[in-house]
Image: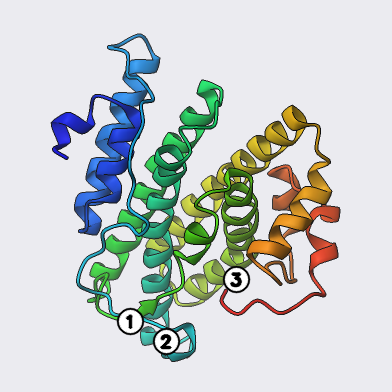
Amino acid sequence: MSHAAAELTLAGMAEAVLRTADGREKTALSHRYAALWRDSRAGGAPIEIGTATPPMQPARPARPELLNPRDVPRRKPGSPEGRKAILHAIAHIELNAVDLHWDIIARFTDVKMPMGFYDDWVKSADEESKHFNLVCDRLEALGSFYGDLPAHAGMWRAAEDTAEDIMGRLAVVPMVLEARGLDVTPGMIKIFQSAKDPETVSALEVIYAEEVGHVAYGAKWFNFLCGRDGIDPKEEFHSLVRRYFPGGTKPPFNEEKRAEAGMPPDFYWPLADEVPVAWS
């Protein structure tokens, strides 16, 4: 599909991002399409939602090498190499997040949703694209780059497992994986504060603030679908996490930021003592 053809529909744009391998090119395209969507919603040329045939796995650059989580080397977080490894892992997460947010647009066009649903995930994809580039810029300033180290091969598994279940996707990706980011990011910020690296601290603070909104979008649209179908959201969330991501919530939890995102403690604490998560 050409980029020009993809611009005809939002789903086509989403698919074009998913089929772009290079991280910087993928995020540039993501920014471009997000801007087109915003313009259309502000009264510009209308863009239909359309349909797409997204790949089961997004295009990826030749590097980084993707390894089983057990095989990804561990490094001391306080060391310079450890801090580079942290940033590399974050860049990998952010690149996957760009694809996850475009994928939910491309993959579930058969589910009738309000336009606000698309607004939210386009905004999230646009922000994740910014996050990827912020972290890549910091890596490069520290003499590294995305692809310099091996990365986690399991990051896309949740997307594959929920490829036919929009509620499962909302439960697992924003409400488990991205909520976990709210739990761990303050600790990472402290590591870079201790290292006297204010530029990285600033980048991580931007990511931390905006990720709250992504978790909130997940909770909002999960609750919307539950309400539309007359389903109890808490019970459905527990059922879906047990099905697709057993042991996917574990303390410590950032209860303040989770609450800000619309996730009360009775959503995640009941799952906390169950089977440990295999990759996190």
Q: Is residue 107 left or right of residue 189?
A: left
Task: Determine which residue is flagged by label 1.
Answer: 150
Residue type at mark 3: give it: Gly
Q: Secondary structure at mark 3?
A: helix
Residue 175 in view: yes
Q: How is the image coloured?
A: rainbow
The x and y percentages for residue 221 are 64, 36
Task: Select label 2 or label 3 by which is in front.
Answer: 2
Q: Earlier in the sequence, mark 2 or mark 1?
A: 2
Residue tagged 3 = 187
Q: How many marks?
A: 3
Residue beneath the point at 54% across and 49% down? 211
In this rendering, position of residue 16 left or right of residue 217 = left
Q: Which mark is residue 72?
A: 2
Of the two numbered discs 2 and 3 on the same chain, state the one appearing first in sequence: 2
Residue 15, percent across and down?
30, 42
Local crowd size for mark 1, using a 10 Å CA cut-off: few (<14), some (14–19), many (≥20): many
